[in-house]
Image (cartoon, rainbow, N blue to C red):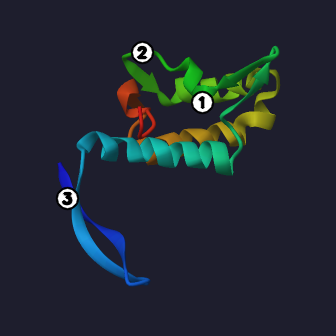
Amino acid sequence: MIAKDRPVVAVLNREALARMRPFVQHRSMTDREPFHALMTEVCVERGWCGSVVDDRPIHVTDFFPDRGMVTVDQFVGWLFEADGVDPSGDLPKWQKHIDGLRDAFIRHMGSTSVDVERLAWFDS
């Protein structure tokens, strides 16, 4: 458990009274913060996370196994697959994207492979 300060706003006689109170943050939540940051970068900022492929909506997380390790190269491959793109057809065209996505995974997850349990949203 990690304790942090979190702002809480209470309303008293129509005036907002802000005070700080400690709250308890479970380790599992902080372990998932890197995944949230990774998905923000690759999905929101870079546009790689999923699409409609063969009339079926697909998201990168649909490829995650139930347990085990996930490598950076698997993750990047799944990003391309979820967007219906085969980079092998024109590798020079896609290489800068592959490199950027690999760098994002390693930077956020801190390794070239992680346990799939770390690749989960806060509420899962």
**Residue plotted at (45% across, 37% down):** 121
Please tell me the numbered disc located at residue 112: none
Image coords of residue 123 (percent x, y): 42, 37
Q: Amino acid at mark 1?
A: Val
| Tags 2 and 3 touching, CB below 8 Å | no
**Residue plotted at (33% across, 44% down):** 29
Quadrant for residue 87, please give it: top right
Mark 2 or mark 3, which has the lower sequence index?
A: 3
Does residue 108 show up?
yes
Q: Which residue is mark 2?
A: 66
Which of the two residues, 50 or 122, is positioned nearer the viewer here? Answer: 122
Please tell me the numbered disc located at residue 76: 1
Does residue 85 show up?
no
**Residue plotted at (52% across, 44% down):** 38
Q: Amino acid at mark 3?
A: Ala
Q: CA distance from mark 2 to mark 3?
A: 30 Å
Q: Which residue is mark 3?
A: 3
Mark 3 or mark 1, which has the lower sequence index?
A: 3
